[in-house]
Amino acid sequence: MAGDSHVAGQPSSKRVADYALAKFKSFGLDARLEEFEALMPWPIETTVEVVGPEKYTLRVKEPVLPEDPDSGDQTPLYNAYSADGDVTAEVVYVNYGMPADYERLKELGVDVKGKIVIARYGAGWRGIKPKVAYEHGAMGCLIYSDPRDDGYYQGDVYPVGPYRPEFGAQRGSVMDMPIHAGDPLTKGWGSEAGGKKARIEDAETILKIPVLPISYGDALPILRQLKGKVVPNEWKGALPITYHVGPGPARVGMNLKFEWKNRPLFNVVARIPGATRPDEWVIFGNHHDAWAMGADDPISGASALMETARGLGELLKTGWRPSRTIVMALWDGEEWGLLGSTEWAEKHNAELKQKAAIYINTDGTGKGWLNTGGSHSLQQLMGEVAKEVMDPRTGKPVFDEARRRAVLSEAEGDARKAAEADPALRLSPLGSGSDFTPFLQHLTVSVLNVSFGGESPGGVYHSAYDTVKWYQTFSDGDYSYGRTLSQLTGTLIMRLADAPVLPFQFTDTADTLMRYVVELETLAAAKKESQVDMRLVRSAVESLRAAAQDFEKAYASVGRANTQALLAKKQLQQLNLLLLTSEQRLGNRDGLPRRDWFKHQIYAPGFYTGYGVKTMPQIREGLEENRFTEAQGGVRTVSAAINALAAQVNDAARALQQATR
Ligand SMILES: [Zn+2]
């Protein structure tokens, strides 16, 4: 699957989908392609020149390495959903190009209006950089990988070491995903050939200025020719120059032209029908499309998913049938903006809200330790499963190292002490950056996101050097953690598919929400003028905790002995439906302010972070961005959502008590 470049929308992506489809069938699974389409611009012109003082034509190409012939079959270097444009202007260096960098530029007396900005990758999602540049009046944007963050400063470059070589660059989407994911022309409904589409002019998520990713080899001739003030210390990269802000005298001309066309997407979907509860679904997905070969991103995760599918196929041959329906999917077009998963989720919206108990997501995976994020009602289940799957290196449960690392990731002091005292493996809240987003934040279905990593170096992310050779040399070379990931997802799926009562639990949710309340109380106290009063949210979380404790008491009283009796009762179906739809209570129909596609009131990608999560986003971003009326409105919507969940957990506790009577 990683033997050819296979970018979405191109025939090579269909080839990978067909290959995976044949594999699923050979495992004995009922599988098919589900086709969608999306507006996917393909570059036909990406020319960048330094027109003066000293001329230089950028390569905008990653050279083939003789040591790794796979690095040769490349897609062009570009950022998907850049605007077309032919602009020439003086250049300004804007550090990471995040909002705070523009505050600093203002202090330095530099304006980017009418200029082309050059920003380095890092500190936030790439799509934020051209968006903020445009908001400040820039005409174009170049994003480069500085060797300090991503190159020789980190270690030896590929092929000697794993890090980004001189002319390696990072492709990627710059779609305005904090507004909505998926096809820019079909916000909220599945995009199919011949279906309803918005006009391109009305699309909210296409960038307004041209933007292109470049290598540090190509950035150097630009940065070397900047004058003006020397940059602040923390803005300095690792190129052999003194970094200046500009503007100019370096002038750059960039001419970008794309062919704007709807192109097909091929999701591969396999189903194992549930024997006794076919209308309760456990869904597991990973994308199959890549920017080039994608051995790490996403094939390392996609092949682990296929191994899980193969294992379930073997079980089916022994006569095993899951109680619930299992759906396994390989999504297309994730790299462009979660296209395949979003269109699928939007098309099957109503059915998924009735039937989807959980969506489990994986993506690229490496070696190291377990990373998990997701809905906190699944924290206990995740912890239990992590105690039963062994680390291939230590032979001990993957839980141990994951918890140790999670504690270490907390800031020293009270936060770390609190984490140390907590025996649980805490799930991280999810922002965005992979296919869980349409499920969690649009449908408000509960999700888990899992991977192994921490010891795999970065360095070839979204480049032509993300090859099988790179992966085998520098990441999970013997695929032992890939197998572990497959064991972990397989165990999760089988528990979820067969547990008489869905293994959800809500005291972790209440504890986690209370931590967010405390954070926001502190933030509100620092901004007294906001008049944000968190008491309503605090009391909603307390109601949830009381309901959660009742539910757990009832759950604990179900012994092995009465599980069989329980299975026969029809209240069980009602109980499972209450649990299956519990996460939906944390969403609301209106969604978040200025981005109504995002329905979840607890987790969202930040408006100005892109991938980074903002919890209780309406309150938190309202406070951070001084939109106090919005923050006050957030207190009402967040407390209403939590109260609705508390009421549903109460109903579930009662249903469980009745069923076990
Ligand atoms: Zn990926």
Image: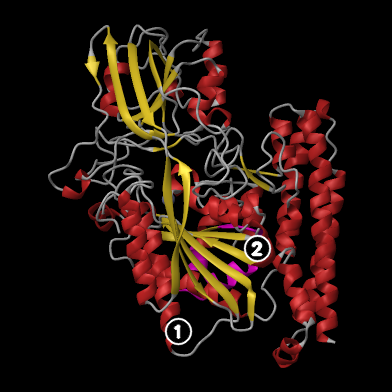
Q: Position of residue 318 (x, y in %)?
A: 44, 90
Name the amino acid, label 1.
Leu
For label 1, the SS is helix
Please tell me how crowded label 2 is: few (under 14), some (14-19), or many (20+) other residues with Cα within 10 Å: few
Name the mark nearer the viewer: 1 or 2: 2
Q: Earlier in the sequence, mark 1 or mark 2?
A: 1
User: Relative to 232, is 321 above or below?
Assistant: below
| Magenta-drawn stretch contains 388 | yes
| Magenta-drawn stretch contains 592 | no
> Residue 607's quadrant in the figure?
top right
- Residue drawn at the location 74% of the way across and 62% of the way down: 582
Range of residues picked out in magenta = 373-401
Q: Is residue 491 left or right of residue 236?
A: right
Between residue 517 and residue 136, name the one nearer to us: 136
Mark number, residue 59: none
Residue assigned mark 1 = 315
Name the amino acid, label 2.
Glu
Q: Position of residue 472 (x, y in %)?
A: 26, 58
Q: Is residue 177 left or right of residue 369?
A: right
Q: Position of residue 549 (x, y in %)?
A: 81, 69
User: Relative to 71, is 168 above or below?
Assistant: above
Residue 5, can we see it?
yes
Residue assigned mark 2 = 351
Between residue 145 and residue 147, name the one nearer to us: 145
- Residue drawn at the location 81% of the way across and 85% of the way down: 660
